[in-house]
Amino acid sequence: MISLFLLIILLSIRLIIDLDLGFHLRGGQWMLENRSFHKFDVFTYTVNDHEYIAMYWLYQIILFITYKLFNYGGISILNSILLVIVFFMIFLRMKNHNIRPGIISIIFLPALFTMEIRFGVRPEIMTWILLLCMLTVLDQYYHYGRNHLFLLPIIQLFWVNLHGLFIIGWFLLGAYFISKYFHEHKFDKKLFWWSLCTILISLVNPYFIKGVLFPFYLFTRLQCSNIFKGAITELTSPWSTKALANMPHLPLFIYYAFVLISFLFLIYTWRKRKLHEFLIIAAFFYISYTTVRNLPIFIIAAMPIIGTGLNELLSKGKLNFFKKNIPGAMRPAAFLLTGFIILLCIRIVTNAFYAGRRGGNFGIGIDEKMHPVAASEFMNKNGLRTRFINDLNRGSWLIWATKQPVFIDGRLEVIQEDFFREYEKSYQRNGLTELINEYGPRLIIFDYSYPEAMIWEIQLQQLPDWRKIYWDETSVIYALNDYRPDLEAINFMKIVHKMGVDTTTNSDQIWQLLQRPDRSRFIAWLKGFYKYNYFPAELGRMAYYASVNLEFHASELLYFEFLQRTDQNHYAAYIGLGTIYMLTGQLDRSLYCYERALKQNPKSEIAARRIKEIKEYLGNKPLLYK
């Protein structure tokens, strides 16, 4: 277990990429400065008549105080400590169920890989901790008669002021109470009165009855018809094709396996199960079925079910194969598991674990390649205090870093469905123009890295009154031509040069370097154990954006720099270069790059199609690269 907890610690130490961090920090700062709770929104100019019911207000204050004392690094460490507490409590709960240590280890590892996709700086981690606290108190009372029920109201008091899913606590109380009545055929007065006190103490929050009713609004997002569910990835069902297309497959497949195995073990051991176990696993499966963000809640409930099921399987006398062979295999299996975990820990520290999946980075503090840190500094340095339109991804950080009212941000409970529909229309033809006409911004700032952003980009390119004044790895800023004329329109090549990219390299030199053979994947994998790995996703984003702006040489240089800096998958860079060369009429080079892309990804339909098109066009003409 020591190696497993080392793995948990290392997986929890990662640069902060969570887009909501900004509004949480600003929210905590605002409350302390104004000595008031949030009431109506003060962070946007579009929905400032909307109520802001921040059931995570205490989390925001804790986060801001941590930042003031220890900067962003302190937030990383705090989050890591909270995650270690979560898994330590899971371990204790499984141990209290008399689950064998070897079985706990076997269950922990896959569970960790599903839960780690939600290891960000989010208030939902407080729900995991308080959920486990309540389960522990109820288990101790139900199974062992240990009366610590007085802790339930205290747990709920923290829960209702830390996260909006505190209503799960009500469900747990009801499930255990019904189960006790069902099995013992008596009305448990102690549990009833402490449960009633726990429910009533939920009213002790800054919003009183509105706060108590708030989770019921959150549950509307679980409905398929809700606009947020269709637009926000974390609200997608893990069983949907969208989740499979946009998420790592391993965590999803582990979740599917946990669902299947936990239900099978419930059926297999149903005579020994209590009613509350069926109720909890069914309810938590439902909320995990509806949205990806709730996967850890189901995993937390499923782990003891699977553990006790495996215990039962091994103790059955009639299953002689398991009884005789598995215990003897546990020691070598433990050595193998420990070795695997140690190797994995090494790859996490060298960042190879994250580079290989092209997302996240090991470390402490903020990931400046994911947040508009530099863009915000540019706005502050140049005194750009004016009305602007921003996209959803940028709003949270701009609230925090510029201290200006934003157009929209990730507080969906404030934004609400009607305004979000208006925002979504901007990604239709002339939709952004309509927003500009209605709100009269003088700046537009957005994250250009996702497909919908290109719709804004195309619309802005067709508006002669707007110019680009800023561009970096995360964001682009447009300004009206008559606003701050002292700020010149950007020069792509100058920006690329300032990034440290050699802009004197010409296309012929790049072409010679591109024809180098692919690096050995095995050697690249081995380097992950002794050399720091980094996947420069931001260079790929910038290269693509430059190509959309027909800045082909800048794009070419950025793609080349991308290829130079990583041993990881080069597929996207070759596709991008193939497109550039096709658009500039360099079909021989385009064909070569598409063939390299197809070699990297044999299933690539776009590469195969472009290769066919170019070969048909060239006919029998000789190919220069051959």
Image (cartoon, helix red, strand yellow):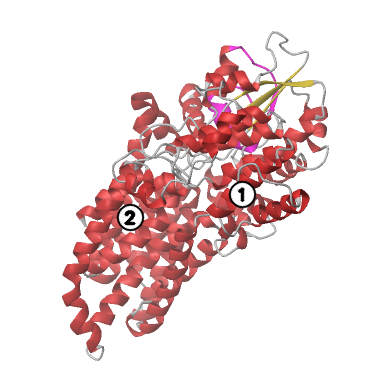
In magenta, the rendered stretch is 382-405
Residue 30 got which mark? none
Residue 2 pos. (x, y %): 20, 53
* Viewer-nearest of discs 1 and 2: 1
Q: Is residue 396 magenta?
A: yes
Contact, mark 1 vs mark 2 (Cβ under 8 Å): no
The residue indicated by pointer 1 is: 232
Q: Relative to 13, is 498 on the left or the right?
A: right
Residue count near mark 1 (Cα–Cα under 10 Å), binned few <14, some 14–19, many ≥20: few
The residue indicated by pointer 2 is: 133
Give, as a three-letter code, the residue at label 1.
Answer: Ile
Give, as a three-letter code, the residue at label 2.
Answer: Cys
Residue 173 pos. (x, y %): 41, 63
Residue count near mark 2 (Cα–Cα under 10 Å), binned few <14, some 14–19, many ≥20: many
Q: Relative to 578, is 559 on the left or the right?
A: left
Residue 520 pos. (x, y %): 41, 49
